[in-house]
Amino acid sequence: EELWKNATVCFKTGTRTRFKIRDYLIPVRVSGLSVSYLDVTGHNGGLQGSNSSGHQKKDKEPSMASNIYEMIKSIKKPPRSVAEEIVQHVESSDQVEKIEIAGPGFINIFLSRHYAIGCLKDILLSGVKLPSLEKRLRVVVDFSSPNVAKEMHVGHLRSTIIGESLSRLLEFLGHDVVRVNHIGDWGTQFGMLIAHLQDKFPNYLKESPPINDLQEFYRESKSRFDKDEDFKKRAYQCVVKLQNFEPDHTKAWKMICNESRKEFNKLYERLDITLTEKGESYYQTRMVELVKTYADEEELAYIPNFIETDENGRKVMYGHPNDPIPLILVKSDGGYTYDTSDMATIKYRVEEEKADWIIYVTDAGQAMHFEILQNCAKKIGILDDTKVRVDHVGFGVVLGEDKKKFKTRSGETIRLADLLDEGLRRSLVKLKEKERDKVLTPEELQAAQEAVAYGCIKYADLMHNRGNDYVFSFDKMLDDKGNTAVYLLYAYTRIRSIARTARVTPQQVQEAAATVPISLDHDKEWKLAKVLIRLPEVITRVTKSLCLHQLCELTYDIATAFAEFYDNCYCLEKDSAGDIVKVNMGRILLVEATACVLRKCFDILGLKPVSRM
Ligand code: ARG
C-alpha cells in the first residue's frame, strides 16, 4: 500500500505481478487477483491508491484508464520497449527483489524475501498492524434491525452477522463506529397490538401481562384487524394516541417492545453481537419536524419545494427524475411511512450524530429504497455526498437445500433460536463422532461445541459473496474438510499447539523474534509468508467493497498454505522414542506469525478460537 501511494510503478504483494502491455493499454494483473491500471506518468502514484476521504467515486477508474490509453497510444512504440522504459523508471524499493521483462512485454516484479521477513518480525514483535488511517471517521453501521412483534428471520440474521463483522473491521482500523439497531418499533401495527392488549389483558397497567408468544399475539391481533371493522377503527385510534405519546398507550407499547427485546437480546448474546438500540420510534418528533420543514402547505408558497401532493393525496418527492417511484413522506391519511422515518433518521445521523459514513445492512431487496432515499436527501440538502459516504450493504436471500426460500418443513419461517439450537445439536454430534468427548473436559467440549456451531453459521454467511443468494446447509458448514469454520478452528488449534509441544514459551518467542533469523528458502515457507503479509492489502480492499468474503478467502488461504508448509517442513525433530531433539526456532516463528494473523482474521469474522477441540 505504501508503494501504491507514492511509487512510479505500483504493485502488490504476490508471487509475481505482471504489468501486461497489450494494445498499449496496460492492465495491471496483480497475482491474478485484481486488475488495475499502471500509471506510467509517475505523477499520480498508483491509480488504486486510496483517496483521502475514503470516499468511493465509482466512475473514476474508467476515465483514468482511458487517459492512460490515450497517452500510451501517443507513444507509438512496441510494447517491449515501453516495458523496458517503464522498468528503467522504476525506483528501487526494499519491497522489490528484482524486475524482469518477459515475452512480448510482461513485467514481472518479484517480492523481496528480506522485506517479507521484516513484516513477519513486525507482526511477532508489535502485533498485526493494519493500514494506518488517513482520517478517523465516525461511521454509523445500521444493522440487524428486526421488527418488533414480527418474527426475526434469517434475513435479519444475515444483517446481524455481516453488520457485526463490518463494525469489527472498522473498529479495528481505528474508526469511531456507532453500531445501531434500527428496530421497527413504530408504525401502524402497534395500533392493533395495543388494542388487542387492552382486550386480552385489561389489567395491563397494573400487572405485567404474560405475553409469552409475541408472534402468536401478533397473529391474533392481525386476524382481528382483518376481520373486525370496529377493532380496526380502535386500532387506528390507538396509533394516533401512541404517536401523541399518550401515557397509557406508551406504556402498552413499551411492554410489547420489551417482550421482543428480550428475544432479540438472547440471540445477540449467543452470537456475541454488540448493538445499541435506536429504533424508528426514536425519530417520531423528528419526523413531525421534517414534514413541517419540507412539506408544510403554508411554507410551500415561500420556499423552493421539492415535495408535491400526488393524485392520491400523498406527499411525495422524486430524488432523481429517473427514480421509478417516489419517496412517500406522508400518506393520504396523514400517517408517516418507512420512507419518512429513514429520511428523519439520515438527517439525524448527519446533523446530530455527525456521521462521516453511514452503512445500511439490509437485504438487497431494499437497494432501491436506499437509492431513492439518498437522492432525496441530497436534493433537499440534508446529505452532501462529497462529505458523507453512504453505502447500502445489500445481501441475497437465504435458501434451503431445496433451493427455495428457507422455511421449516411445514412452510413456516424458521425461528432463529431454533436454528441456533439445531446448530449446537449437530456440532455436538460431530465432536462426538470424532470422540472428542473422550479427550476434552466438559467445559472444553461445550466451548468447542459453541465455537463450532456459531462459528459455522457466521462463516457460511460471510464466505459467500453477499450479493448472492446462498444455500443454508448444516452438512456443508460442519464439514471439517472444506472451506468452513470447523476446518479453520481446527487449523488454529493445531497451530497453537506446535509451540506448546516444542515447550517454547511466549516469552521465548518474543526473544527469538528479535534475534533468530526466519528463513523463507523453502517454497512452502515462502508461500505461507506471502499469504500472511497480504492481510493489510485485503483489509484495504474489503474496506472499499464491504465484501467480507474477500477476507474469508484470505483466511482460508492462510490455513491451507499453513497445512502445506507443515506437511513439508519440520518444525521439530524427534528421536525414535518420540522425544524432541531439535527445535527449528525460525520455523516456530513462522508458525507463531501465522497464529497472530489468523487470530486477527477470526476476530474480525467473529470466530471464537478455542485452545483445545
Ligand atoms: N426493519 C427493517 C427490516 O426489517 C430494516 C431496517 C433497516 N434500517 C433502516 N434504516 N431502514 O427490513
Image (cartoon, rainbow, N blue to C red):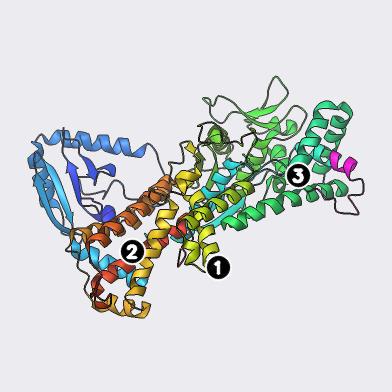
- Residue 68: in sight, yes or no? yes
For the stretch drawn in magenta, what is the main secondary structure?
loop
Q: Nearer the viewer, residue 240 or 428?
A: 428
In the picture of the structure, the residue carrying the numbered disc 3 is 214
Left or right, 111 with reference to 492:
left
Work out which residue is located at the far top of the displayed protein and give it: 311
| Label 2, residues with CA under 10 Å away: few <14, some 14-19, many ≥20 | many
Beta carbon of the mark 3 residue lies under 8 A of ligand 1: no
Whole-percent x, y for residue 400 in the image: 53, 36
Q: Quadrant of residue 567?
A: bottom left
Left or right, 568 with reference to 444:
left
Left or right, 244 with reference to 203:
left
Q: Secondary structure at mark 2?
A: helix
Q: Image height check: is 445 above or below 321?
A: below
- The reply to whether the magenta stretch includes residue 201 is yes
Compute the Cα span from label 2 to label 1. 27 Å
Q: Quadrant of residue 152?
A: top right
Residue at 86% in and 49% down: 247
In the picture of the structure, the residue carrying the numbered disc 1 is 443
Compute the Cα span from label 3 to label 2. 47 Å
The amino acid on which the numbered mark 2 sits, given as a three-letter code, is: Thr
Q: Nearer the viewer, mark 2 or mark 1?
A: 1
Q: Which residues are magenta?
A: 196-211
Whole-percent x, y for residue 335 in the image: 75, 33
The amino acid on which the numbered mark 1 sits, given as a three-letter code, is: Glu
| Label 3, residues with CA under 10 Å away: few <14, some 14-19, many ≥20 | many
- The reply to whether the magenta stretch includes residue 75 is no
In the picture of the structure, the residue carrying the numbered disc 2 is 594
Residue at 72% in and 46% down: 281
Residue at 71% in and 41% down: 287
